Image: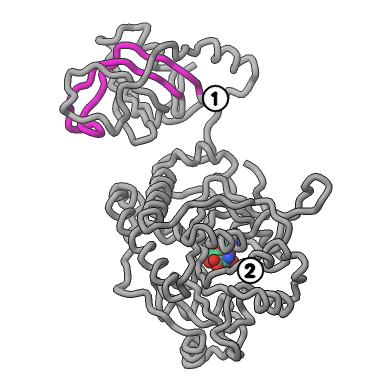
Amino acid sequence: MRFGLCGLMHITSGRRRRSLDSKLDKLDDWRRTHYSSDLSPQLDGKESVVFGWIASIRHQGNITFIILADKDGFMQITVKRDEVGEEFYEKVQRLGAHTSIGVKGVLRAISKAPNGVEMLPKEIKILSFATLNPPTSLYGRRLPSVDKRLEIRAVDLRRPAAQAVFKIRQEALKALRAHLIENGYHEVHTPKIISSATEGGAALFPLLYYNKEAFLTQSPQLYKEQLVMAFEKVFEIGPAFRAEQSRTLTHLSEFISVDVEEAYVDYRDSMNRLESMIREVVKEVSERCVNELKTLGYCLEMPQEFKRYSYDEVLDILSGLGYKLDWGEDLGSTHLSVLAEVNPSFYFIVDWPAQTKPFYIAPKDKYSKLSESFDLMFGSLEIASGGTRVSSRRLLEKRLKEKGLNPKSFTYHLKVFDYGMPPHSGFGLGFERLLMILTGQSNIRDVTYFPRDQRHLTP
Ligand code: AMO
């Protein structure tokens, strides 16, 4: 059986698979000496062992060029028939894209190859055959739909553009964590199985917890607030679950929430922290992911400042553009699109009516209808929200009742407030939404390894 250029024949029968399995080599004591990123012309003449999967294979006369991909990039294996002998050469002719191999050989500097070096192989191990054609081409300009690609997500993630997105994800995560730890925040983990809603009753996933009803958490809100009593400055980067009723390009049923909470500060400090954290992440990503951003053909321009518009100012702007909104109403998608034309980059909307915000957000003062709250926007996309918290038990109970929630369901939380809850403030940031902005992707599923939404419970 000969595999075509970059392609594979469909070999689906069990007999065929068994026959291929019998042709596989064992890893034995072969171990990698170099990743593609370690290779350079300086290694000319050195022995090396490399592993990876075949990104492409091209036969040209008596030479076969294999482009081998590993976690860091690509390398070239140049198989010359007269140097490797017939048996080796025949073995190579059986290879096709996505096959996993190991190669031992000598490195040779050559300007045309990736990293300026190619490998002239001496031994090869075939470690697994790809027996099906993936539904997506790695290099195709026109991508199949996300739904199609998600069917074999593990292979779809081998696309250079996907690799670029997820390397940026990794760098962004590192930068977020480093920024918070360097600024004195303590990383925490809070329960994901909880007994009551924190972000309103509608979007909860119920589950059976022994013989009781429980829920997957919508956010670590109440726990992060409790933890400031002992640790003052805390953060968590973890999953949050929302039973979203609509399918959009910006909502997941399970997303990663970056939650920050701090004692003895208010919402102005939280906004400053959020802005400096995002600036740091953008700086790190643009410095460390130059190649990845180039692969994506994307560059994020940062504004001089993150402007702060009050809710009332936003209403005035919208009204000036012919979009009337009653005071106290939340902004709809049309309003957000209009605002995105006024400010397509990062900006805050602050001082929201208390009625639009959750029970734990503090009113501006005793008689005000406004709250000490903010949303961080990027054009029409909300990336984060936060605010000063209610720190008095009496007021929290009142706010719960106003929101139609039963204070009894929150007894475990309310009683903490009897032991001297300090004033505190914080925010929650949708990590995937931030990534959409960092990578220029328009569908949140493209920045998520295995997205969960109404349609996807597998893979
Ligand atoms: P909120 O509900 O606004 O606030 O959520 C915070 C941020 O999380 C992101 N987000 C989502 N991302 C993807 N899919 C979803 N379904 C989804 N829902 C929300 C958004 C949003 O801005 N406890 C408060 C935060 C706080 O006050 O600390 C909270 O969860 O980017």
The local crowd at label 1, few if under 14, some if 14 to 19, many if 20 or more residues have their Cα within 10 Å, is: some
On whether residue 451 falls in the magenta region, the answer is: no
Location of residue 115 in the rendering, given as x and y in whole percent from the top left corner? 23, 33
On whether residue 112 falls in the magenta region, the answer is: yes
In the displayed orientation, state which residue is furthest to the front: 419
Which amino acid is tagged 2? Phe
Residue 333 occupies which quadrant of the picture?
A: bottom right
Location of residue 229 in the rendering, given as x and y in whole percent from the top left corner? 54, 62
Q: Quadrant of the C terminus?
A: top right
What residue is shown with label 2? 417
Which amino acid is tagged 1? Thr
Q: Given this view, does label 1 or label 2 mark the residue nearer the observer?
A: 2
Can residue 258 be seen here? no
Residue under the point 49% across and 13% down: 24
Q: Give the answer, above or below, for where 248 lies relative to 361.
A: above
Residue under the point 68% across and 65% down: 415
Q: Which quadrant does ligand 1 occupy? A: bottom right
Q: Give the answer, above or below, for where 179 lies relative to 400.
A: above
Pick the front one: 174 or 372: 372
Residue 21 occupies which quadrant of the picture?
A: top right
Q: Give the answer, above or below, for where 400 lies relative to 160.
A: below
Rounded to the nearest angstrom, the CA distance separating label 1 from label 2 is 61 Å
Pick the front one: 229 or 299: 229
Residue at disc 2, secondary structure: helix
Helix, strand or loop: magenta stretch: strand
Residue under the point 63% across and 68% down: 417
Residue at disc 1, secondary structure: loop
Q: Earlier in the sequence, mark 1 or mark 2?
A: 1
Q: State which region is magenta.
A: 100-129
What residue is shown with label 1? 131
